[in-house]
Image (cartoon, rainbow, N blue to C red):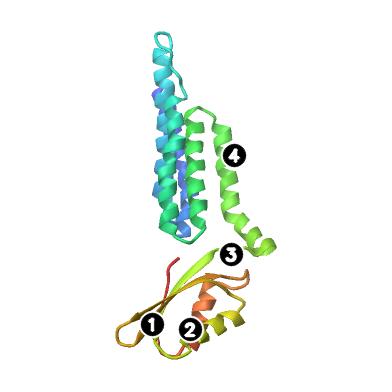
Amino acid sequence: MSVYEIVFKLALAGILGGLIGLERESLNRPAGLRTYTLVCVGSTLAMIVSLDMYFQYYQTVNADPGRIAAQVVSGIGFLGAGTIMREGVNVHGLTTAAGLWVVACIGLAVGAGLYIPAVVTAVLILFILIYFIRFEERFTGLREYKALVILAEDRPGQVGIIGSILGDMGILIKNIQLTRLEENKLEIELLLHLPAQISISDVVFELSNSIKGLHNIERLN
């Protein structure tokens, strides 16, 4: 394998991983442009090293060219688990983790010289990440869970008022946690399942205009 071919493979991996990472970066995901680029380039290098060692020693030892590369697929699980934990209740952490795994596979394909499959896969992944969420919202009405923390005065019926507002908007309260603080303040942590036509910004706006004694509303995801 020539030096020029190695440089080309690493550069192509950086471009493909960067394109997918840029889409994740635009959505403020925990793994973005740099992470995806590093994973793709690193996977490509692992495959290059694996193939190079095989061609150097296959005549003297029983070498397996896929041994080093195989560890990339299993090792990427640590990064994926980290993104899911970072996202908390947000199911999009799974999408980010799956994206890292696919990007690692793209890097392995580039390192093996399978350029067309790698490019086609990268284009397909970009299409899925950009457009499938629109199909999901339009045809199935699926929405991620959203978490809010409300800090307000501890008044009688305060929680009931919030529940009534959310109920009128058709929002399902998946979980609620109350914490009474000093200075007669109440912290309300909500896990909400939103209808397809309502965004978390709409919820924050409605609650901000309806809750009496409101101090702060914070979005957790």
The outermost residue toward the right is: 139
Marks 4, 3: nearer the viewer: 3
Label 2, on which residue?
A: 159
Rounded to the nearest angstrom, the CA distance separating label 4 from label 2 is: 51 Å
Badge 3 crowding class, 10 Å Cα cut-off, few under 14, some 14 to 19, many 20 or more, is some
| Amino acid type, label 4 | Val
* Disc 2 residue type (three-letter): Val
Q: Which comes before the other along the chain, label 3 or label 1?
A: 3
Instruction: Tell me where residue 90 appears, x and y as whole percent.
Output: 49, 61
Tag 3 residue: 143
Establish if 117 lies above or below 160: above
Q: Quadrant of the N terminus?
A: top left
Secondary structure state at the residue bearing disc 1? strand
* Type of the residue with mark 1: Leu
| Position of residue 97 in the picture relative to residue 171 (left or right) | left
Under circle 2, the secondary element is helix
Label whose residue precedes the other's in the sequence (2 or 3): 3
Q: Residue at x 56, y 49 (%)?
A: 126
Q: Which residue is mark 1?
A: 186
Q: How far is disc 2 from disc 3 in space, using C-alphas?
A: 24 Å
Q: Amino acid at mark 3?
A: Arg
Q: Nearer the viewer, residue 72 or 155?
A: 155
Residue with the mark numbered 4 = 120
Residue 78 appears in view: yes
Quick one: label 4 or label 2, which is nearer the N terminus?
Answer: 4
Mark pair 1, 4: CA separation: 53 Å
- Location of residue 194 by image quarter: bottom right
